[in-house]
Image (cartoon, rainbow, N blue to C red):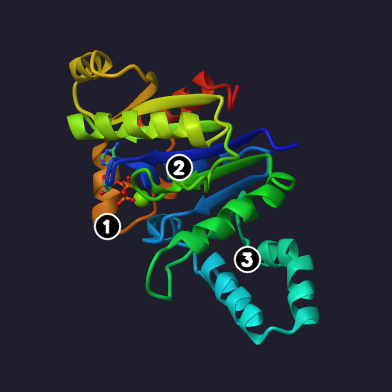
Amino acid sequence: MNKWTIAITGKGGTGKTALTTLITKILRQRKEKLLVVDADPAMGLTNVLGIKISRTLEDLRLEIIKVGGRGIEEEKRDLILSLDYKIMELLIEKPGFTTLVMGQPRTSGCFCPANTLLRDALKPLTQVFDIILIDCEAGLEQINRKVVKTINLLLIVSDPTMRGIQTASAIKEMAQKFTHASRIGLILNKITNPSIVEIMRSKTDLEIVGTIPFDPQIAEFDLQGRSLLQLPEDSVSLEAVSDILSYLNIIQ
Ligand SMILES: Nc1ncnc2c1ncn2[C@@H]1O[C@H](COP(=O)(O)OP(=O)(O)OP(=O)(O)O)[C@@H](O)[C@H]1O
Ligand SMILES: [Mg+2]
């Protein structure tokens, strides 16, 4: 039984991918089956996790278009019947977790079709994984398009800026309409001073489920191109994320 399907959203550059990576680092040591989805076409998470991509959901989408275009009924039926299996084939095993990459659109125009495929792919995956963690594209798009409607927890990341908080409020409103999330929490990231948290608390009606300090080690790892999975266990950001997971009852 799937316990958690969690989407990580927020304004661009607030730390969605860093948070997804830190959660992955903590959860991969546990027994639950963890799937981490890079749903951002920019594939930042794929880079941070050091994943070598073989096939993405976008490749599968192109295969579906090709088969559809050939118009052979039997071939189309076979593809539909084997779709769940084909999605499973896209999964990449890493120590302690599995990943799925949405990929970059290779046809021009709107990116909705790959998003639709991701929405459909999430359903069978909830049968297989205990926890699904989705690193979303910045902004509202994937919420509005119901790509992540099956989530039960939405984590919105904001940096200490008004624009971050405003985007968070807009995401919350959309998520209440377009997802099944029973809990929506705000995480304040890159905090340099506790007084900032109080100022931000007064500016939002979102539940603040945790704060993550600005961590010079994250900046240093970023500069060196090192994966945040290698952050030392006692790093301040990792400890903060661990507290957040306990607060949300994801870990005990
Ligand atoms: N707590 C932190 N302390 C220091 N630097 C951080 C922290 N969190 C994130 N960063 C840095 O902020 C930058 C943006 O982080 P990240 O890529 O995780 O954001 P994002 O929301 O995924 O961005 P995008 O919208 O482009 O996908 C990166 O350079 C990252 O190293
Ligand atoms: Mg990102």
Residue 35 on image: x %, y %: 60, 48
Position of residue 252 in the picture relative to residue 247 (left or right): right
Element type at mark 1:
helix
Position of residue 94 in the picture relative to residue 191 (left or right): right
Q: Residue at x 54, y 37 (%)?
A: 6
The first of marks 1 and 3 along the sequence is 3
How far apart marks 3 and 2 lie (CA) works out to: 23 Å
Q: Is residue 132 positioned above or below 79 on the image?
A: above
How far apart marks 1 and 3 lie (CA) works out to: 29 Å
What residue is shown with label 2? Answer: 143
Could one spot residue 199 in this view of the protein?
yes
What residue is shown with label 1? Answer: 224
Q: Is residue 176 positioned above or below 199 on the image?
A: below
Tally of marks: 3
Q: Residue at x 48, y 29 (%)?
A: 176
What residue is shown with label 3? Answer: 90
Q: Is residue 134 positioned above or below 193 on the image?
A: below
